[in-house]
Amino acid sequence: MEFFIDTISKTIQLTQADKEVFINNCLVTKLKKRQFFLQEGNVCRYAGFVSKGCLKTYTIDKNGDEHVFQIALEGWWISDMYSHLTGEPANFTIEALEDCEIVVMDIEAREKILKEVPGYERFHRILLENNYMATQRRVNSMLSSSAEERYLAFIKKYPQIVQRVPQLVIASYLGIAPESLSRIRKQLAK
Amino acid sequence: MEFFIDTISKTIQLTQADKEVFINNCLVTKLKKRQFFLQEGNVCRYAGFVSKGCLKTYTIDKNGDEHVFQIALEGWWISDMYSHLTGEPANFTIEALEDCEIVVMDIEAREKILKEVPGYERFHRILLENNYMATQRRVNSMLSSSAEERYLAFIKKYPQIVQRVPQLVIASYLGIAPESLSRIRKQLAK
DNA sequence: AAATGCTATTGATGTAGGTTAAGAAAAAAG
DNA sequence: CTTTTTTCTTAACCTACATCAATAGCATTT
């Protein structure tokens, strides 16, 4: 919870009273490895802040194959935004890759925080902008780079993830088969 | 300019006074086919609303090849958000595919509008959310669908674009070679 | 109505990366 | 420490799509 509040106060100023608004409106949940924060088809009632652990957000296609959309370490936010905003069933599944602690905020909690913490709207907008720009860059890299180039960019950008997360999850995130990633790594090792 | 204001008032309520704030702070520019709204390397000083015509937003890779990020018809917004927010040089180039009319808003204009039109912050947030979710879906389709499936989804989602825009632009948007798209279409015609 | 670019099509050929299958290595569970 | 599960690697083969090259069809311009 401290980590959660510290993270927010890196972007916006928070008074002691503000901090208590967060403490009074957010809950901390724990997830064991392989447990779900959200399953496809359910409504995403909560937005979550990862304060400990690591999760993957993915879709499942018609063949039952997973496609990883996000890998979230400490400090990242997780949710299915579409489902969260509209109340429609989620397309994403969010699953713990390690034992996790998640700070959880439902819609009423967020409304309350938006009302009572003046800067939070701005924090929220900046987070959204950053996520959107990162996703733009990802589309671009998929349009313009080879699998090897994307992997090299990934390990440069997210070295911590490479340490902690199975290669097959990273391969899926990059849109390549795990066997191909293994070959790419072998090739690069030279 | 009416179209611009009408579009905004579909999402948020606008008084006559609000409308005048837009009129007094935004400009209309015209672009001829093949002219640039923004060129890679320049700072993106303006956000633009397409009130007439059609443009493509693209990056140019190290081989000089174009990769289309967005195809914007009437009612769409165009900018390089990263450059616009940070003042850094743009990675995107935005070029008219037809003669265009663009309603243009610089940073001061937006600040003023945000201050004077209470609902605009919300409009802006909703626009950002929708763009972000659309880009999420695009990443997903690139991770999980074949070229043919992506083309079929595209013509279903954007039939107007298919009518108006050269196939090679659509091919680039979908991340496939124009020759391949031609073959996919031939195949589908049966 | 020619001439000049663009854009789309087609065919031949190449290749990055997928698929299948099997075994090795590493982690987790008992 | 042994067993079981998960992950990673390797090799043989395959396929979706790219690339190259030539031609033809349109639109613009003159």
Image: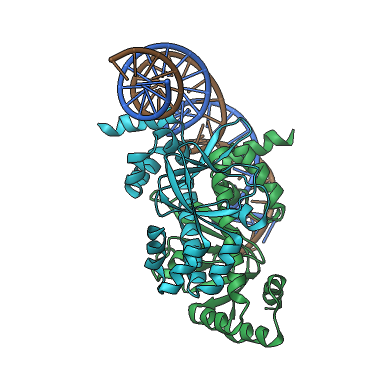
Chain colours: A cyan, B green, C blue, D brown
* Outermost residue, right side: B190
B184 vs A104: above or below: above
**B150 vs A187: above or below:** below
Q: Position of residue B186 (x, y in %)?
A: 68, 36
Q: Who is closer to the viewer here, A111 or A29?
A: A29
Image height check: is B155 above or below A119? above
State the residue at coordinates (67%, 44%). B153
Quadrant of the snapshot with the N terminus of chain A = bottom left
Query: In the image, what residue occupies the spot 50% across and 64% down?
Result: A24
Quadrant location of the C terminus of chain A in the rendered image: top left
Residues A12 and A135: in front is A12
Q: Nearer the viewer, residue B8 or B118?
A: B118
Q: Quadrant of residue B178?
A: top right
- At a point 61% along the width and 30% down the height, the residue shown is A63
How far across and how far down the image is residue A27, in percent? 50, 56
Is residue B80 in sight in this rendering?
Answer: no
Residue drawn at (59%, 31%), measured in percent from left and top? A64
The vertical placement of D8 against B34, above or below, is above
Please tell me in which quadrant of the rendered image residue A87 appears: bottom right
Q: Nearer the viewer, residue B47 or C13?
A: B47
Q: Where does residue B3 sit, x and y in percent of width and height?
A: 70, 74
The image shows residue B40 at horizontal and vertical percentages of 43, 63
Where, by quadrant of the figure, is residue B2 drawn?
bottom right
Report if residue A74 is visible in the image.
yes
